[in-house]
Amino acid sequence: MEEARQHPAISGSAENEASPEAREAARLRVVALQAFYVHAALYVVANVVMFTVNLVMGGPSWFLWPLLFWAAGLAIHAAEAYRLFPLFGTAWETRLMRRLLDDESRGRR
């Protein structure tokens, strides 16, 4: 079996102390934060482009509508990435998994 690679930011002792579940949870958290940062960067770039196009073309400020609606989506993404409102957090996930596994073991779907 292939040995897992150690991330350079994690010391050997910290990795040995963490359970596989904790390491996987940390990895998923990093992935979620990276996705949010990419989303935020795309938001800024796209809205600068839309603002510039609107400024050059003239007319009413149409760029504000996508800016506002996209900002709402970005805010929801930020709340999820930073776990500000853990509606579907670890406890919920554990309860749901137990319920689904119990249903499967009883032959229900």
Image (cartoon, rainbow, N blue to C red):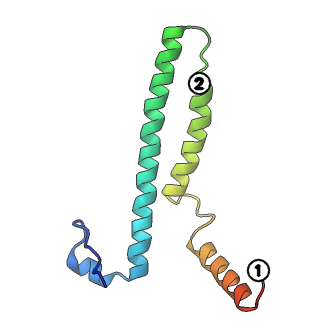
The residue positioned 59% from the left and 24% from the top of the image is 64
Give the answer, above or below, for where 48 lies relative to 109.
Answer: above
Give the answer, above or below, for where 51 lies relative to 60.
Answer: below
Residue found at the very far bottom of the displayed protein: 106
- Residue 105 position, x and y percent, is 70, 91
Which of these two is toward me, 84 or 58? 58
The residue positioned 23% from the left and 81% from the top of the image is 13
Q: Amino acid at mark 2?
A: Leu
Q: Amino acid at mark 1?
A: Arg
Instruction: Name the mark nearer the viewer: 1 or 2.
Output: 1
The residue positioned 78% from the left and 85% from the top of the image is 108
- Residue 51 position, x and y percent, is 50, 20
Secondary structure at numbered mark 2: helix
- Residue 109 position, x and y percent, is 76, 80
Dot 1, crowdedness within 10 Å: few (<14), some or many (≥20)?
few
Q: Which residue in the protein does label 2 denote?
A: 64
87 sits left or right of 74 in the view:
right
Dot 2, crowdedness within 10 Å: few (<14), some or many (≥20)?
some
Residue found at the very far front of the displayed protein: 1
Quadrant housing residue 14 = bottom left
Q: Which residue in the protein does label 1 denote?
A: 109
The residue positioned 28% from the left and 78% from the top of the image is 15
27 sits left or right of 14 in the view:
right
101 sits left or right of 15 in the view:
right
Gap in angstroms between the C-alphas marked 1 and 2: 46 Å
Give the answer, above or below, for where 101 lies relative to 57.
Answer: below
Q: Tell me, for residue 93, which label it has, or none.
A: none
Residue found at the very far right of the displayed protein: 108
Give the answer, above or below, for where 77 lies relative to 27.
Answer: above
Mark with earlier residue (1, 2): 2
